[in-house]
Amino acid sequence: MQDALGEVSARTGGLASSYATTAAAQANNYYMAQLADKIPELYQLAYSMYMDEGDRLRSDLAMLQGMESGDYGRYQDRLGQYNTDRSFAYGLNRDQVADQRYAQEWNYQVGRDQRSDQRYDREYADSRSDTAWEKERYANETAYDQALAKGQTLAAGGNFSGYKALGYTDEEIASLKSAYDREMAAEMLARRSGGSSSGSGGNSTGGKDKPSMTLAQAEKAIENGAVTDAVRYAYDYYMGEGAYEQFYGAGTAENENAAVVDMDSVLALGYGAISADRLADLEDAGEIESYEENGKIKFRKTRNRTGMIGGTALGF
């Protein structure tokens, strides 16, 4: 408008005329009309600019949010990795502790097994030793029982050699043999003298009173040399009348040389271990006969007229 007013005024010498004013007003109206036509466009432009600014801000916000989300995601990743590493380290430590404890338990169990095996081996060895000892003891006892039975069987016939295996000395065996021979001689003496012999000891009491000492006590006194009338009486009571003089004598040469029974000749008869009564019965029946030889009373089977020995044909 001012430009139009100035341009028209310049035509009239610089003075504003009504025309110039009108022209300026028209120019102003024209431009104002043009401006009014631009208002919607400008409004739309401003609105577009506003919306663009809002979009830009939203875009910036989204970018910031994306960046924040990215940062948070990276933080979560780092935290997750940290937790993973921490869990791994913890698990590794737990595994190491578990491995150590397992190794300790394994070593402990191995030690227990070794001690158990050693104890089992000792118990097994002890049991085998006990079994071997029991077998050895049983074998020894069985052998001893067998030797004892054999010794007793032989001793019943006057043969005491079986007692050697039982640990008896030669002196003890000789003493037993001597005692047995004396007992057999006493029984034979009693049978020959007509006295009555008892089944167990062969003694002839003859109605005498029983002595105050036993036969063992009397024999012990005789062995010790403490011979008294009571000792002689007791010995004769148990062993038969005159037995003391028969076996030990009374200081005479006749009694000192008294004969004893030879048990080897008794066993050689073939009847086994027999008593003095049985010998006497066989002698009375004429199947055997007695004779003295080398200071001993011996026995042998008799020979009859038909050429038989003890009732057995000889064939000559």
Image (cartoon, rainbow, N blue to C red):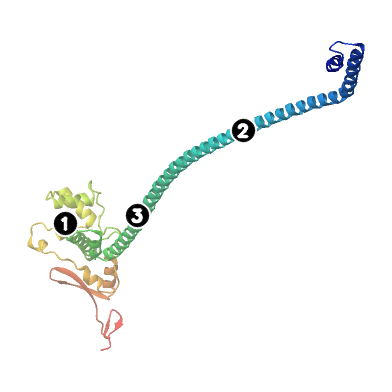
Label 2 vs label 3: CA separation?
Answer: 76 Å
Residue 171: x and y in percent read 16, 59
**In the image, what residue occupies the spot 81% across and 27% down?**
48
- Is residue 283 shown above or below 49? below
Q: Which residue is mark 1?
A: 244
Q: Residue furthest bottom?
A: 316
Residue 117: x and y in percent read 40, 50
Residue 181 visible from this viewpoint = yes
Q: Name which of mark 1 and mark 2 comes first in the sequence.
A: 2
Q: How many marks?
A: 3
Name the kind of residue labelled 3 in the image: Ser
Q: Which mark is residue 129?
A: 3
Residue 182: x and y in percent read 19, 61
Q: Secondary structure at mark 1?
A: helix
**In the image, what residue occupies the spot 90% across and 11% down?**
17
Mark 2 neighbour density, 10 Å: few (under 14) some (14–19) many (20 or more): few
